[in-house]
Amino acid sequence: MSAELIAEIEKLKKERKAVILAHNYTLAEVQDIADYTGDSLELARKAVDVDAEVIVFCGVYFMAETAAVLNPAKTVLIPDPAAGCAMADMITGAELRALKARHPGAVSVCYVNSTAEVKAECDISVTSGNAAKVMATIGRDKEILFVPDRHLGSYISGMEGRDYVLWQGHCPIHNALLPERIREMRAKYPGAPVLVHPECPKAVRDLADECLSTGGMCAWALKSDAKVILVGTETGILHRLRKENPDKTFIPISDDLVCADMKKITLEKIAESLRNMTSIVKVPEEISTRAKRAIDAMLAVS
Ligand code: 13P
Ligand code: SF4
């Protein structure tokens, strides 16, 4: 069944001049048929560079929306439009406008895990892979509004040694990771390095060896001499880490780190999406033009 489905996807991909982009958290079989797998920053860049008429975006909606905003001339499909991001939904455009009104003159920064409507209200966006580099370009005299992730915001503001006004959003999956769990796993696997995502709370980040984007974790693992590595992010990444490093052992810090939305994209839905050209990701032009400014400003830095 799966072999038939994969053959159909390959055939439809050629007919439609399509490429498949998949996030590091998607199902293993989805990562395996994708043309490119990566983190939010790598996929945003790929969406611009790929020579294709159609992009099938396997990830959550804000990522597909970013690809659509960056590529008005390409058709961007998401195989399941219900694949959302709880963090992205923690702030609306209207809420951000109200915050900006309370802080006139401030620079508005959004984590890429936000809707296009929110990006349209921002001066610049960041991903977990480039946040430090992008924030360093903002004048020290400026007040900074950082939305929606309070954890990524506090991580970078701590690194920079200046305060941001932080929106109190979070990723429910990473936010649930507790420092006790890191201590437990360290005791169980002494000497194994601990990697966590910047969406984790400070108490967890403080106990880690490295705090990295998912792409950063993949790059770090390739270079590391460690034989056993503890991974503190969504468990979908383990497939790629194990595939690229067959000589190393990767252990999830918690099996509960599962983003149900990332698992909504299946091979069946990808085939259906290419067959019927659904669901097309459409961003109203007025929002898209303004959101693109914030994303382009980020891509110009990193
Ligand atoms: P990355 O950009 O590090 O892949 O993170 C995306 C994400 O949604 C993490 O929860
Ligand atoms: Fe959003 Fe968290 Fe899922 Fe990432 S893991 S897509 S931040 S809900």
Image (cartoon, helix red, strand yellow):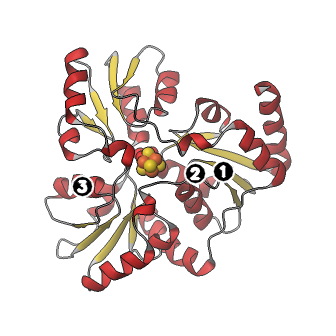
Say which residue appears at 76% left-offset and 27% top-offset.
2
Front of the two marks 3 and 1:
1
Specify the label residue 83 is tagged with.
2
Of 155 and 41, which appears nearest the observer?
Answer: 155
Mark 3 vs mark 1, CA separation in Å: 32 Å
- Left or right of 48 in this view: 195: left
- Left or right of 108 in this view: 141: left
Q: Residues within 10 Å of mark 1 (few under 14, many from 20)?
A: many
- Residue position marked by numbered label 3 in the rendering: 156
Q: Residues within 10 Å of mark 2 (few under 14, many from 20)?
A: many
On whether ligand 1 comes within 8 Å of the CB at mark 3, the answer is no
Mark 3 vs mark 2, CA separation in Å: 28 Å
Which comes before the other along the chain, label 3 or label 2?
2
Q: Residues within 10 Å of mark 3 (few under 14, many from 20)?
A: many
Which comes before the other along the chain, label 3 or label 1?
1
Element at badge 1? loop
Residue 190 visible in the snapshot: no
**Amino acid type of disc 1?**
Asp
Res 124 quadrant in image: bottom left
Q: Is residue 104 above or below residue 35?
A: below
Front of the two marks 3 and 2:
2
Q: Are marks 2 and 1 in contact (CB under 8 Å)?
A: yes
Element at badge 3? helix
Q: Is residue 242 above or below residue 151?
A: above
In the picture, the quarter occupied by the N terminus is top right
- Residue position marked by numbered label 1 in the rendering: 80
Element at badge 2? loop
Specify the label residue 71 is tagged with.
none
Say which residue appears at 49% left-offset and 65% top-offset.
115
